[in-house]
Amino acid sequence: MNHRKILISVFVAMTAFGSAQAQRVKGSDTLLPLTQELAEEYLEEHPDSSVIVTGGGSGVGISALMENTTDIAMASRRIKFGEKMKFAEAGLEAEEVIVAYDALAVVVNPSNPVSKLTREQLEAIFRGKITNWKEVGGEDRRIVVYSRETSSGTYEFFKESVLENKNYMSSILSMPATGAIIQSVRQTKGAIGYIGLAYLNQYVKPLAVSYDGGRHYALPSVETAADGSYPIVRPLYYYYDSAKEAVVSPFISYALSPVGQQSVLAQGFIPVKMESDEGTVQGDGKDNEADNGEEAVGR
């Protein structure tokens, strides 16, 4: 990925026209590498445009949108009711677009013999009720639990989906980014954590997960996320102020185009529209789900 090209384009645009001409995209670290890739491809087709992409977490991006320090907020969880109220109080109207879907992989050290867990076992581990791997068929070794920090949309979604909105254990080790979780799990034999599917590599081992009490297990992959057999799947969002639709529409339209969605797949995410043997993950990008936040897939 040529990050230098993006930065140079942004610098030239800001110098020539002022910072208001640059589309600013900020938020979810899960969406960060995908959006950087989309921005690079978009700039190749639109050399007179400029896009600057930064991370910080879903909450940071949504706050920046309210403060008018970004044009698009990237979020790996849905906007909260309280955030909607703050938008309304500020006279803003947040528009929501699903740009991709993402599977969360539960990962352990590659030396760990445990290969699968139920949702109930995962809940007990992340809440501190199960503390030794021997309790789930593994070695006699203390479980070291890693999580994302509280500002992360990934933290919020894992709590909602796996813990059923119960609290994490108080002694959980919070990491500022996905890379830190991968490094920690790689270096700690008793470790467990969770990461986005696109970040999965040979240094950590994904677990098969069951949401039906152990009757069916599935490993995380683009295919199992798309056909619904892998349960921990979430939408990934772009949010913007409706008053700026004309400004952000070209980039968002590119992200949702066939070319943009091919990049989504190439980066290890699930496209908004994807045919599979068992079913279809699809949509037009606009979220038509009810306000209770139930997900279209993986629940």
Image (cartoon, rainbow, N blue to C red):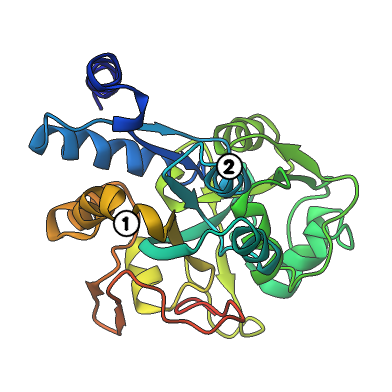
List the single residue furthest toward the left.
45
Q: With 164 as the anchor, is 241 left or right in this view?
A: left
Along the horizontal axis of the image, is 100 left or right of 113? left
Q: 184 above or below 114?
A: above
Q: Which residue is mark 1?
A: 245
> On screen, 3 above or below 114?
above
Q: Nearer the viewer, residue 204 or 145?
A: 145
Q: Earlier in the sequence, mark 1 or mark 2?
A: 2
The foreground one among 86 and 237 is 86
Label 2, secondary structure: give it: loop
Circles 1, 2 touching at the beta carbon (< 8 Å): no
User: At which x and y percent is residue 209?
Assistant: 57, 69
Residue occupying image coordinates x 58% and y 63% = 79
Residue appearing at x 13%, y 29% in the figure:
48
Check disc 2 and report the residue beneath it. 67
Residue at figure coordinates x 28%, y 63% from the top left: 271
Q: Quadrant of residue 293?
A: bottom right
Q: Give me the disc on residue 10.
A: none
In the picture, which quadrant includes the C terminus? bottom right
Q: Nearer the viewer, residue 137 or 207?
A: 207
Question: In the displayed structure, does residue 192 sit left or right of residue 252?
Answer: right
Instruction: Work out whether residue 280 can be spotted.
Output: yes
Residue 47, position as x, y percentages in the image? 11, 29
Distance Cα–Cα, label 1 vs label 2: 17 Å
Name the quadrant containing residue 33: top left
Residue 135 on image: x %, y %? 83, 63
Q: Nearer the viewer, residue 125 or 176?
A: 176
Q: Secondary structure at mark 1?
A: helix
